Image (cartoon, helix red, strand yellow):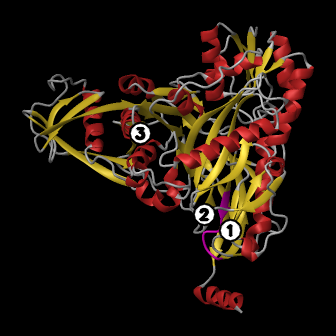
Amino acid sequence: MISKVLVANRGEIACRVFRTCARLGVRTVAVHSDADAGALHTRTADEAVRLPGSSPADTYLRGDLIVKAALAAGADAVHPGYGFLSENPDFARQVLDAGLVWIGPSPEAVEAMASKTRAKELMGLAPLAEVGEADLPVLVKAAAGGGGRGMRIVRRLADLEAELTAARAEALSAFGDDEVFVEPYVEGGRHVEVQVLADTHGTVWALGTRDCSLQRRHQKVVEEAPAPGLPPGLVDELHELAVRAARAVDYVGAGTVEFLVADGRAHFLEMNTRLQVEHPVTEEVFGIDLVALQLRIAEGGALEAEPPAPRGHAVEARLYAEDPARGWAPQTGVLHRIGLDEAARAAGVRVDTGFADGDTVGVHYDPMLAKVVAHAPTRAEAVRKLAGALERAAVHGPVTNRDLLVRSLRHEEFAAGRMDTGFYDRHLAELTRESTDPHAPLAAALSSAAAVSGAGARFGGGWRNVPSQPQVRRYRVGEKEHEAAYRWTRRGPEADGAVVVHADASLVVLEVDGVRRRYEVARYADGRVFVNGTALTELPRFPEPESRREPGSLLAPMPGTVVRVADGLAVGSAVTEGQPLLWLEAMKMEHRVTAPVSGTLTALHAAPGRQVEVGALLAVVQQAPPEAEGSADHEESQ
């Protein structure tokens, strides 16, 4: 029997494994980088071992250090989680060679399927050896790992070499392996997968289907089980293919076989030889604990001949610290409040997270904050429950994709189950359109005044008892500025278009057109104000003169590390609008910085390895005169 498990991972998945272990009476060990010294997974485990450094390459990708940590802590088993080394056969061998139990498939099975190129060959498929115009569009893909890293869509042959280089660099950083391959890109397909679970006694379960079509940067955002609208014959085919893939490599443990479904046909993508991020939707539908079953299988236990019968529908949304309106740019900073649990308890939904109030979202790792999962008898009920729980959750800190998730779940295309992997390509603009409650700035202003004056619900104490001139406060909400005006009267505060029913430092109640609305207000030391989840930044009464920046300045959109500069780029280089100039790495993703206009590079402050803060000046492009632009365009067209 396993008595102590080390989880070779971090964040949400480590916390999730620890939760099951605690329920089973199994002790737990965390490993952590210096950046994660105070992280929730480090605080949750019974014991923790430091991995010196902060970058994944120095810490969570060091299998030798992790095995050493397991032995030092007296663990008898290692759970790999997902990402990092979870699909690395050499790491699995290191664990077994150290006399530890590996909670996963055999190294040989991992080796056969963890490389997407070898997996395709095993299924009778092969990547493209050469790419011509007739093959476009194609997808460049990392052979190791997953999570959308090292993937690029190529629609022009001229872009292929640059995208291969970028994919190799990103794959090496994320997985320690720069092998990539090219395959046809299926337009308008749905991403459908099958969860498999196999024991050492020859039993293989196919645990239904999952639809994971809502993706950004080839990384899943919303997942559900079962996949809606699939004909029974196709479901049977997917199950048979998944079981065939598992049996082909004598698979043991939990794994996922992924497909693209288009025109009623299933196209094999890969087999992930690990637990998937979206495994909770399968757990909710089948009423099982996949981590507990992983431990049972690792101990030599047998599965029942048939899995439990599925019931109802489950939907999962991934909450990220990112700004969808700005190219999905990851966000960092203090997470003052992650009030998902209160909303979850009220709605009866599940929350898996690796963060708690007051934790910091850093630059080194994936920006996922939590997974929120709703289960109900029908798909429509599950979607409504999940959207409501997200909408009511108080998430105070960095910008998140929370509003995007709510709008996605309520979008008519998703509600009808007609989504595909191009959903956000078509609908991102409408889903990120600003729609702030116009009375949120007023509520912030009134609560601020109440806090300063010490006033309470009856507007006593510091409230002035004579009429006064209107008071005006200015706030920035997103990209827009808003003014909030109010004045003191003998009856208390008044505001245009709203009756102030109650105002104190944390709660304002306004009546507009006979309808009363509550506004919960929270302020933090960094100057941010949150009103019912809307983030506002109070602006000074007399704005300071803004420091001038030269036109064409390229500023870092996020904190990160410069990983590459375009070949041959130097001060004086001629560049064209949209040309990639340099690449930043933040939160395990590469972000391309392009020329804003055509012209000449007049300054370059970026160099590989340089760490930059958000807003740092990277380069300056001086725009070419209109005549020069016209000449360049004419020459290019010849």
In the foreground, 8 or 596? 8
Q: Is residue 537 visible?
A: yes
In the foreground, 423 or 466? 423
In the image, which residues are magenta? Answer: 592-598
- Pick whichever of labels 1 and 3 is earlier in the sequence: 1
Q: x and y percent of residue 161 in the render?
A: 80, 66
Q: Looking at the image, is 425 positioned above or below residue 506? A: below
Q: Is residue 269 magenta?
A: no
Q: Identify which amino acid the numbered label 2 is placed on.
A: Glu
Q: Identify which amino acid the numbered label 3 is placed on.
A: Arg
Determine whether label 2 and label 1 are within 8 Å by CB.
yes
Q: x and y percent of residue 31 in the render?
A: 74, 22
Q: Quadrant of the N terminus?
A: top right
Residue that label 2 marks: 187
- Pick whichever of labels 2 and 1 is earlier in the sequence: 1
* Image point (54%, 59%), residue name: 422
- Please give the label number shown on residue 137: 1
Q: Describe the element under mark 2 as helix, strand or loop.
A: loop
Q: Residues within 10 Å of mark 3 (few under 14, many from 20)?
A: many
- Pick whichever of labels 2 and 3 is earlier in the sequence: 2
Q: Residues within 10 Å of mark 2 (few under 14, many from 20)?
A: few
Residue that label 3 marks: 379
In the image, taking residue 201 as reference, residue 335 lies left or right, namely left
* Distance in Å between CA atoms under marks 2 and 3: 26 Å
- Please give the label number shown on residue 375: none
Q: Identify which amino acid the numbered label 1 is placed on.
A: Pro
Q: Quadrant of the C terminus?
A: bottom right
Q: Describe the element under mark 3 as helix, strand or loop.
A: helix
* Distance in Å between CA atoms under marks 2 and 1: 9 Å
Residue lying farthest to the left in this orientation: 490
Q: Is residue 596 magenta?
A: yes
In the foreground, 591 or 125? 125
